[in-house]
Amino acid sequence: MTIKIAVSGAAGQIGYALLPHLANGHVFGHEQVELRLLEIPQALKSLAGTRYELLDCAFPTLSDVICTADPLEAFDNADVVVLVGGFPRLKGMQRKDLITRNTSIFTSMGQALNDVAASDVKVLVVANPANTNCLVTLKECSSRINPKNFCALTYLDHQRAKGQIAQRLGVSANKVKNVTIWGNHSETLYPDALTDGYLVDEVGNKMPLKSTLSAEDVDWLKGAFVSTVQNRGKKVIEIRGSSSAMSAAISAADCLKKWLVTGTQDGETISMAVYNDQGYYGIAKDIVFSFPCVCKNGEWIVKEGLTLSKLAYERLEISQNELLEEREAALELIEPKLKRSISTSSSTISMMSTASEGSLSDVKSSSVVERNAILSKI
């Protein structure tokens, strides 16, 4: 069996860093994979060079690489789709403006998925605002593709949180388990290490963080740690001069691996932004919200029954309210009963191959061109 994997925005920094992990067996083991690389026409020349490089790597698991500007070709019978390409937040742009731009793009992506992708396709949304882009996409597919087949990338924040704790405690990051990212992939996310987080000692014992750490470390987890994780992407841009590409790419690859291939270990959860159709933890339904998830047999299940602190619920409510505002802004554009008059200028929206931090994407390194074939369905 050959797994057909489509990646939008494949010529961007994240795409360039992600593709080898999809091609070399890191995610799907010994299975053969066919990569469909989707870009705007002006980026196809650059993408052709990436194709040459992938073929030159001679990965034994890579069967073919297809470059295209047509989402219908890229998504045709696709098994896995990673949506990396989106419009980044430019200087002076309000978040609602960003949502308007990306709603057009992800409406188009959803329509193409609904038309031609495999009915059991699994879709990971990376481009920001990731949660709401994911919601827009799945709503265009809901008649044919299960909303549980969609996920937005908060696993990057999950790994950032684990890394911070590991550095603080002087342990390997793989010893830190069940840190949870709640909410939106934005500065309102809540990294929670105390509700269910634990350390694994040398003999495999699980030591809950809230009962084994010093009072000073617990205070850090409630304060500076939260702010650090919330603002990590901005800090990377400030120091590096461009967005998180390497960490976003490996997080996307590892999220797919946990979700679709290996599953989570016994007792382990990972953070995934998923469609909330059940009102988990009292959070409003019909938004894409990050929860602690168990993965098994290619499916995710929200871990229920955790006892959250008053502070945690307050933080979750802040992120929920932001997502509700984003949803309303998007639904005004995609639901007929809420549609407003939209200028024909919307048909010339630009699309970039963005990095993970959509609010502060590396504009200089992105291909900024006028939208055309890839968004022709809008």
Image (spheres, rainbow, N blue to C red):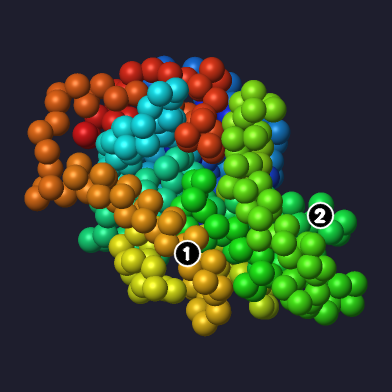
Q: Residue furthest bottom?
A: 305
In the rendered image, the vertical position of residue 116 relative to residue 291, given as above or below: above
Foreground tag (1 vs 2)? 1
In the rendered view, does 299 fall on the left or right side of 103?
right
What is the x, y in percent for residue 54? Answer: 63, 32
Q: Residue at 62% across / 29% down in the picture?
A: 237
Neighbour class for label 2 at 10 Å: few (<14), some, many (≥20)? few
Q: Is residue 45 left or right of residue 248?
A: left
Q: Give coordinates of residue 335: x percent, y percent.
A: 16, 49
Quarter placement of the C terminus = top left
- Write down the quadrant of residue 28 in the picture: bottom right
Instruction: Name the spot of residue 206 as percent of width and height, x first.
Output: 78, 78
Dot 2 falls on a residue whose secondary structure is helix
- Residue lying at 67% horizontally and 78% vertically, measured from the top left: 266
Q: Which residue is mark 2?
A: 168
Residue 314, numbered circle: 1
Q: CA distance from mark 1 to mark 2?
A: 26 Å
User: From the viewer's perspective, is 102 left or right of 192?
Assistant: left
| Location of residue 142 (image quadrant) | bottom left
